[in-house]
Amino acid sequence: MRPFLLEENALFRGLYCWLGANEGNRGFCTPEGEALARDGLLPLGWEWLAYGAAGLALVLLLVNAFLVLVMLYTYMERRVMARFQARLGPNRVGRFGLLQPVADAIKLLTKEDVAPTGADRWVFNLAPIVMFVPVLLVLAVLPFGRGSFLADLNVGVLYVVAVTTVTTLAVFMAGFASGNRYAMFGAMRAVAQLISYEIPVVLSIVGVLLLARSLSLVEIVEAQRVPFVVVQPLAFFIFLAGSSAELNRTPFDLLEAESEIVAGYHIEYSGMKFGMLFLAEFAAVLTTSGVMATLFLKGWEGPLLPSHLWFLIKVFGLAFLFIWIRATLPRLRIDQVMGFAWKFLLPLSLVNVFVTAAEALAWDWETMTPQQVWAMGGINLLVGMVGVVLFSHLVRRPAPRRAARARAAATAEEGV
Amino acid sequence: MPLRTEPVTVNIGPQHPSTHGVFRMRVTFDGEVVLDVEPVFGYLHRGSEKLAEERTYTQVITLTDRLDYVASMTSNQAYVLACEQLGDIQTPERGRYLRVIAAELQRVASHLMATGFLLNDLGAFATPLMYCFREREKVLDLFEMLCGARITMTYLRVGGVFQDAPEEFWPALKRFVAEMPHYIDEYEQLLSENEILLARTRGVGVLGTGEALNCSVTGPVLRSTGFAWDLRKVDPYEVYDRLEFEVPVGEHGDNYDRYKVRILEMRQSVRILEQCLAQVPSGPVRAEVPQLYRPPPGEAYGRVESPKGELGFYLVSDGGIAPYRCKVRSPSFINLTVLRDLLVGWKLADMIVTFGSIDVNMGEVDR
C-alpha cells in the first residue's frame, strides 16, 4: 500500500504543521511547513486532532471542488442536449448561462419541503443522502492526476464496485417510502435492473484486472502500456452499456421513465431532496466516467498537458458520450432490458473473461512486444464483433404476446 | 406453482406526460402487465355541439378550431363543407385549392406532432420531438401568413377562405415543399431503422383489419392494417380528384406501421402541395355568401379525411341563422374504442406507446 495523498499534499502538511506540529512530531512536515511548525497551536498529545482537522479540510476541499464540477456538468449536459435538439439551452443566467446551476440550486433550496402523508418519513428523508454518499465515496480511491489520490487502496476496484451498488438500495428506499404507485414501479424496476447490470459490469472489469494483475486503480493506470480500450474493446463496450444502465440513462432509464411512470422513484420528492437525488445522478455520471477513464483510457496519462487536465478531458469526453447516447436513443422495455443484461451482456462478458484469461496465460502483459499487444487487440476486437452478432440474435425475439394475453385472461377470470 | 402477484390499479392521467392532454386510464396491472384498462374522458368537455346551436354559422367555425387544436384547418374544412351542402354553395376554384393547401399543410403539421410525441413516448428524450417541431414551426409560419393566426386559424369560411394568400406566401410554400422531403429523410435516418425502435414497436399493439372496421376506426390507424380507405380517394371533395397521390398502407397494423404510415403520408402531402402549386388558378377565393348565412331547412353531412381519420359534421338547419343541431363525428373519439383490445396483455411501456400511436387529440375526443 502506498502513502496516502494526504501525507504528500502540501496543503495538508501546512495545515497539520500549523495546528499541531510541536517538537517531536514533525513527522512529514515540508521545509515550507517547518517554518510554520516551530510552534503548533495545539499542545503536545493533540496531534490526532490536527491530523483529523487537516484531513477533513482537504476532503471538504475535494468534495466541494467535485460538486462544482458536477454543477458544470449539469450545465454542460443541458447545453449539449440542447444543441443536439436544435435549441439553445440555458443562456440567460450569467455569461453563457453558466450560473444556471446556481439559480437552480437557490430555487430548489427555497422550495417547501413536502413529504406525502402516506410516506415512511425516516426512509423517505434518508434516501437522498444514501443516494449521494456512495458517489462521493468513490472519490476516495479515484486517481485524478499523477500522484493525486486520497487513498491507493489495494482493493480499489472492489471498493468502487461495492460502494456504487449502494445506489440500488437508495433508489429502492426512495421509491418504496414514497407510498406512490408510480414510485413503486420505479423501485421494482430499479432492483431488477440495477442488480442485473451489476454482473456484466463487474465481469467486464475482470478482463482488465487479468491484464493489470492488480485491483489498485493507480496500478491499473500504470499497467496500461496502451489504453486498455485497445486490447479490451468488448469489455469497454459492456462497461459502457452496463454503466449507462446503472446510471439509469437512456436507453435504460426505466426507473424514472418520464413518459411511462412520470418520474419513477423520485416522483414525490421536491425541493432540495429532489435536488440531491438529481445531483447524485449527475455526479454518478462523472464518477463512472472517471472510473471508466481510469480502467480503460489510461487515467491521467497523456502527452504535453498536465495530468489533472488529461484526466478531466477524458472524464468529460466520456460524459459527452453519455449525453450523446441520451439524446439519441429511445428507451427499452423492462423485459428487453432484462434480456439484454442476461442474454446478451452476461454471455459476452463471460466470453471476454475466458478469452482474456487465455491470452494472459499465453503472453505476459509486462513483457509483450508491441506487435503482440496489437495482435491481442485485434483478436479481442474480432471476438467482440462475432460475439455481438451471435448474441444479438438471442435478444431479438418478438414479445410473447399470446402468453401474456392468456395470463391476463386467466387472472381476469379469477375475479380481479 | 406460478408466482402470483397482487394486481394494482393505477390512474394514468388525467395529468400525465404521455396522455396527450387530459385523458385518463384506470389501469389494472399485474406487475408490469396490463390486465384491464378503463378509459375515462370528459375532462376537456366544453359542450361545443350545444354551443354551436347558439351561434351563427360563421361563428361556429371558431368552435371547430378548438376541437382538434393541432389540426384546425381540417376541422374548419369538414364544417364548412357541411354548411355548403346545406345551402348548395359552389366554392370558387382558387378557394378550393387554397383549402387543399391549408389542409395538406395541416396534415403535415399534425403528423409531425404525432410522430414526435410517439418517439418521445418511446423514451427518445425530446430530440425527435424537437426535430419535428422545427418543421411544424415552418408550417405555422405559413399559416400565419395566410390568416395571422398559428393554432386556432378560423381560415376557412362558408363558400371559400377568409382571404387570398399574400404574395410572400407562394415563395415560402415553394421553399417548404422543396425542403420538406429532406427533413422527412432526416427523421427516418434518426430512428426509423433503430434496433430499439423496431424492438419496441414491431408486433406490438397489433390491430386486425376486421377488428378495426368493426370499431369504425379510420385514418392512419385503419390504413396501417392494410386497408386503403382514404376519403380523399373514395369520396373526393374539393379538388382531390384532380390530384395524384397514393394512399400508403401498412401490413401488420402494429405500432411501427402506424408510425411508418404517418411518415409516408407526409411525403404524399408534400406531393399534393407540389401539384397544387402548379395548378392553382387565379380568381376569387370566396363565393358570395351573405354575412348572416341562412341555409334552407334540411340536413347535411360534410366529411373530410382529417389527419386522425374521418372527421364529419352532421348539421341540421331549420332555416335560421344558427344550426339547429351540430353533431361531430370525431375520429379521435372513435379510434379510442379499440384501445382496450390493443392494450390488454401488454406491458406498461407498450401501453403508453400504443396509445401514442393511435394519435388522439383530447379536444376532439371530449368536444
Image: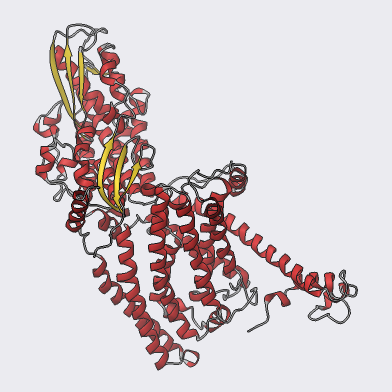
Residue visible at 14% across and 30% down? Answer: B240
Residue visible at 46% across and 61% down? Answer: A247
Q: Is residue B203 left or right of residue A199?
A: left
Question: Residue B157: which quarter of the image?
Answer: top left
Residue visible at 30% across and 61% down? Answer: A336
Question: Residue A377: which quarter of the image?
Answer: bottom left
How many numbered badges does the structure rendering display? 0
Q: Is residue B179 left or right of residue A25?
A: left
Q: Position of residue A108 (x, y in %)?
A: 58, 45
Observer-nearest residue: B134 or A39? Answer: A39
> As drawn, which residue projects farthest toward the right?
A39
Q: Name the quadrant of the C terminus of chain B.
A: top left
Q: Name the quadrant of the N terminus of chain B.
A: bottom left
Q: Is residue A13 above or below residue B230?
A: below
Q: Is residue A291 above or below residue B59?
A: below
In the rendered image, is residue B91 in sight? no
Q: Is residue A160 above or below residue A135?
A: below
Observer-nearest residue: A412 or B272? Answer: A412
- Tell me how the rendering is colored: secondary structure
Q: Position of residue B352 (x, y in %)?
A: 30, 46
In the rendered image, is residue B326 in sight? yes
Question: Residue B224: which quarter of the image?
Answer: top left
Q: Position of residue A38 (x, y in %)?
A: 90, 75
Residue visible at 83% across and 75% down? Answer: A32
Observer-nearest residue: A113 or B174? Answer: A113
Observer-nearest residue: A137 or A143? Answer: A137
Q: Position of residue A87 (x, y in %)?
A: 45, 45
Q: Is residue B111 left or right of residue A234?
A: left
